[in-house]
Image (tube, helix red, strand yellow):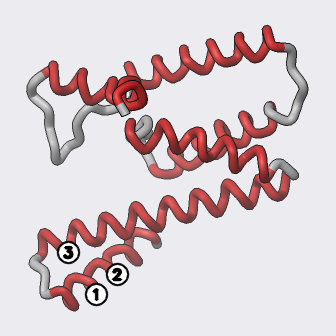
């Protein structure tokens, strides 16, 4: 349904801009990304309100965005897997943040988070895509680790 709506919106925009087929495909893909992101955010905040953890979820969402925007995030096999993984992770962290924890536990969880982030980068964050294959392994490694030095140089 989202794909069909995105294609229709892409065609309408392409017609009004007198774009060629390649440009229309790009517009359609952009609409699909925007709509899917909006749907995911709506689900996230719906569940946050349902569980009574809206403020915590908003803070976790902003923290996740700080890493996902420069890094692109891990890619799952299907959109539904991606949505479920993102919702579960963010809602779990938001829920856990409602509890008082000793500093030792917070440090241990922070270390676990770093370990999980590194594992995700190594195994699941792609350096290239099907349409943008990277042949040079140094460029691929550089792109995979960009989220880590993005914050140091910025």
Q: CA distance from mark 3 to mark 2?
A: 9 Å
Do labels 3 and 1 touch, CB within 8 Å?
Answer: no
Location of residue 77 in the rendering, given as x and y in whole percent from the top left corner: 41, 41
Location of residue 123 in the rendering, given as x and y in whole percent from the top left corner: 39, 21
Which residue in the protein does label 2 denote? 9
Vertical relation: 7 (above or below) 47: below
Vertical relation: 150 (above or below) 119: below
SS at circle 3? helix
Which residue in the protein does label 3 denote? 24
Nearer-N-terminus badge (3/2): 2
Do labels 3 and 2 touch, CB within 8 Å?
Answer: no
Residue located at (64% from left, 63% from top):
42
Residue located at (48% from left, 36% from top):
67
In this view, the residue farthest toward the front is 154
Q: CA distance from mark 3 to mark 1?
A: 9 Å
Do labels 2 and 1 touch, CB within 8 Å?
Answer: yes
Which residue in the protein does label 1 denote? 12
Closer to us: 96 or 152: 152
Residue located at (34% from left, 28% from top):
153
59 sits left or right of 8 in the view: right
Q: Do we see residue 85 in this rendering?
A: no
Find residue 15 and report its image quarter.
bottom left
Q: CA distance from mark 2 to mark 1?
A: 5 Å
SS at circle 1? helix
SS at circle 2? helix
Q: Do we see residue 79 in this rendering?
A: yes
**Where is the C terminus found, in terms of image quarters?**
top left
Closer to us: 84 or 142: 142
């Amino acid at each position: 349904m989202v794909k069909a709506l995105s294609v229709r919106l892409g065609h309408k925009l392409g017609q009004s801009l007198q774009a060629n087929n390649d440009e229309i495909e790009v517009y359609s893909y952009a609409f699909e990304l925007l709509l899917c992101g909006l749907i995911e955010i709506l689900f996230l905040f719906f569940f946050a309100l349902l569980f009574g953890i809206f403020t915590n979820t908003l803070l976790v969402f902003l923290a996740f965005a700080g890493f996902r925007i420069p890094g692109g995030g891990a890619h799952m096999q299907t959109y539904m897997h991606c949505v479920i993984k993102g919702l579960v992770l963010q809602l779990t962290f938001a829920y856990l943040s409602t509890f008082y924890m000793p500093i030792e536990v917070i440090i241990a969880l922070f270390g676990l988070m770093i370990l999980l982030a590194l594992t995700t980068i190594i195994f699941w964050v792609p350096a290239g895509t099907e349409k943008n294959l990277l042949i040079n392994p140094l460029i691929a490694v550089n792109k995979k680790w960009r989220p880590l030095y993005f914050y140091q140089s910025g």
